[in-house]
Amino acid sequence: MPHDPLQLAADDAAAAAIRPATRIADVMQAIRGRIAARSLAPGEKLPSIRALAASMRLSTSTVVEAYERLSAEGVIRSRPGSGFFVATTLAPLSMAEIGPRLDRAVDPFWVSRQSLQADDRMLKPGCGWLPPDWLPQEALRRGLRALARAEASSLADYGSPLGLPALRQLLARRLAERGVEAGADQVVLTDSGTQAIDLVCRFLIEPGDTVLVDDPCYFNFLAVLRAHRARVVGVPYTPSGPDVEHFARAVAEHAPRLYLTNAAIHNPTGATLSPVTAHRLLKLADEANLTIVEDEVFADLETEPAPRLAAFDGLQRVVQVGSFSKTLSAAARVGYVAARRDWTEGLTDLKIATSFGSGQLSSALVLSVLGDGSYRKHVEGLRVRLARARLEVIARLREVGIRPWLQPRSGLFLWCELPPGADATALSQAALARDIILAPGNVFSTSQSASHFMRFNVAQSLDARLFEFLRRTLGSERGPGR
């Protein structure tokens, strides 16, 4: 018996009425995310209705309705007989739309914003820097007084695009102390360590290129790469460095352009790279024509020198970046890039295009403090103070059932496993209501496999209110008798 067209239409309308709105929203969000990430370019054809329905395991009518709504919003256009296409007017970049959708309450941008905007009453064990009273404030004040007497040009003019020559020479000497041979002409100053990474990414990658990162890794690596529309692939991190077998498979499968990692002290785990792992990584990088970007922002905090990929490689395949925000001042924004000589001109051109000249005042202040003999004493004192804080925080965390993944030799961070059943995201949300900012594991993890981990900054974790909150909250989560 043939079907009645009017009955079929009525059935379709009824199905549409009861179809869960969330499924339609999921399709719309997936398309918006791909457009925002530029994996669907203006004018590009969208997947067919049947193909998208099959890949998302949805009905074709759900995809049809989602496409129609996107078309009504002007996000896509229908061409009869051809399909649906991305609108030719590209929407502004939305960082929230790119990559996996995390709970906005605890994603990397939220952690950064909350830490940066926190007032004095808030505790910040999840932030990535030292408390102000741990920094060399008197040396900074001396440097500022000296700057007040500087020539007018130092106070008013643009700086050289490469950066203050005397500071670049000093940095070249500091690099040599760590086994990295670089002339001052191979050092480009930037406004921060983050800008240094951004500059290198602008220079070396295009949208859609694959970049390897550690899993877990510093969460702002993920944010910067997201802004560059890179495809990010995580490699599991071990106590001696990235898992080399996984690294080799990722290189073979994804043909990455870059590998972005930490030197000296790994963030967030506190681990250090072993010489054996370093040599194996460099061999794989050489075979695959892979560039490594090594961030050594925590170098001055290490008590025992760790291997530097840039030292083994001679700055041929490795680029090193750093800054002074962790040991000197986050307010004096100075970073640097150390790279091979034939890349310096291109990096300088990009720096002119994106920030014009260098900040002379900040560079002069950093030079003044680094040249003061008190800086070495300051960092030596920091290492001792951090070691004491690390032992104290480990002991107090153990009392509430939180255990470090490893006991770092140096640095700010403890990468800790929560008690069974505890969820880092839920714990972070509860902490915020008590004016405590935590850093849950999944903001560091590309695979979202660290829901039971938390990063603690030992210098910011000495307040008794933190441990009282953890004791009360984790105790209630575990329940009586556990």
Image (cartoon, grey):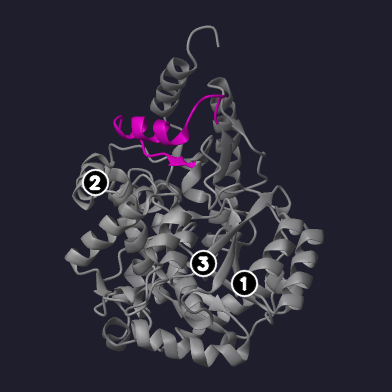
Residue appearing at x 75%, y 77% in the figure: 286
x and y, in percent, of residue 187 in the image: 55, 82
Q: Earlier in the sequence, mark 3 or mark 2?
A: 2
Instruction: Answer whether labels 3 and 2 touch (C-beta < 8 Å).
Output: no
**Quick one: SS at disc 3?**
strand
Query: In the displayed structure, would residue 327 be above or below residue 314?
Result: above
**Type of the residue with mark 3:** Arg
The boundaries of the magenta stretch are 418-440
**Type of the residue with mark 1:** Pro
Q: Determine the CA span between mark 3 and mark 2.
A: 36 Å
Numbered circle sitting on residue 16: 2
Please identify the quarter of the rendering in which residue 35 is found.
bottom left
Query: In the displayed structure, would residue 216 be above or below residue 164?
Result: above
- Quick check: can you spot residue 45? yes
x and y, in percent, of residue 431 in the image: 36, 31
Residue at mark 1: 256
Residue appearing at x 34%, y 51% in the figure: 26
Q: Nearer the viewer, mark 2 or mark 1?
A: 2
Residue appearing at x 34%, y 49% in the figure: 110
x and y, in percent, of residue 193 in the image: 47, 68
Name the outermost residue toward the right.
Answer: 276
Q: Determine the CA span between mark 2 and mark 1.
A: 43 Å
- The question of residue 424 being in magenta is answered with yes
Residue at mark 3: 231
**Quick one: SS at disc 2?**
helix
**Type of the residue with mark 2:** Ala
